[in-house]
Image (cartoon, rainbow, N blue to C red):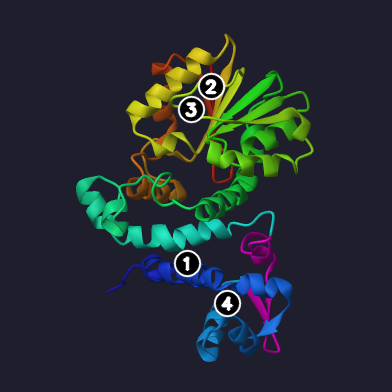
Amino acid sequence: MNLPDAAVVLDLIEAFRRSKTMFTSVSLGVFDRLREAPASAAELAQTLGAHPDALERLLDACAALGLLSKQDGVYRNSAAAEAYLCSASAHTMSGYIRYSDQALYPMWGNLADAIREGTPRWSQTFGLDGPIFSSFFRCEEAMRDFVRGMHGFGMLTSPKVVAAFDLSGFRRMADLGGATGHLTIAACERYGELRGVVFDLERVTAMAREQVALSAARDRIEVAGGDFFRDELPEADLYALGRILHDWANEKIALLLRRVYQRLPAGGALLVAEKLLAEDGVGPVPANMQSLNMLIVTEGKERSLSEYTRLLRAAGFREVDGRRTGVALDAILARK
């Protein structure tokens, strides 16, 4: 009997082990310590308070995964680890990795119950009512760590999103729920005449100002505090929603899109950045995985271009165009 190739099954059996190896190494401070200087397993064990043999196994696993290099018993960060796994890097994703380890990893353990009930797992996993924004980030440090990690993702995706369409005809962009402002920064740095405003909750605005101050376009970018469901939206002829719509059910999306549409002048537009599912719902794999993640974490989900188009047209938009960007977020432009 000729059996089919078992590679896909074997890979998925071990996939969580690879993730947890990286998560644990970030949590222990391995990459931050090696950013200071290369070191042996014994030196790292003493600094990090770990069992020498056990830590050496972890370090060797990281080297096998391409996160570290090892020569003559001395470990060094790979270029990717230096850029994305060290807390001090401007491109760090370590905050989102810690959130993945501490929040998402245990919540995904309850995926079967989420499928049975169709609801998030905050209460079951942590005894919290959710959502993420009000419950898990109860302290300032946790919230800042997460938002900085998401900034690292944004620096990879936002330049591609703002390049997906020609936005040179717009004069002012308001990025709703803009977090650290990476989308606004990318847009204003690409389009020299564009002005921007990062609009998010007051508790996030300090981090946005920190990042905007580092941009060459800082003189054309403002930061304003507010709730896009309740407060008056900033004046703009281009609004942006990056990784926002996938958080919500259709009813709340409809409310937000109507608010945006009513505030836009004639000829204005809305730029949406989300992972787009294929029209039959199968693929790309990251979009399917993120849709399950949204089930576990929020009331939202990932959608196809036609699903977003229906929501946008119901809000009044008529010209809707979608583009695949080749990175983790795709782009939709809807015109009034």
Q: Nearer the viewer, residue 88 or 108?
A: 88
Location of residue 125 in the rendering, given as x and y in whole percent from the top left corner: 30, 58
Q: Earlier in the sequence, mark 3 or mark 2?
A: 3
Q: Amino acid at mark 3?
A: Phe
Q: Quadrant of residue 266?
A: top right
What's drawn in magenta, residue-wise?
Answer: 68-88
On screen, residue 200 versus residue 159, left or right, reads left
From the image, state whether disc 1 or disc 2 is nearer to you: 2
3D distance between C-alphas at marks 3 and 1: 35 Å
**Residue, disc 2:** 233
**Residue, disc 4:** 64
The reply to whether dot 3 and dot 2 touch (C-beta < 8 Å) is yes
Location of residue 43 in the rendering, given as x and y in whole percent from the top left corner: 65, 87
Name the secondary structure under disc 2. loop
Q: Earlier in the sequence, mark 1 or mark 2?
A: 1
From the image, state whether disc 3 or disc 1 is nearer to you: 3
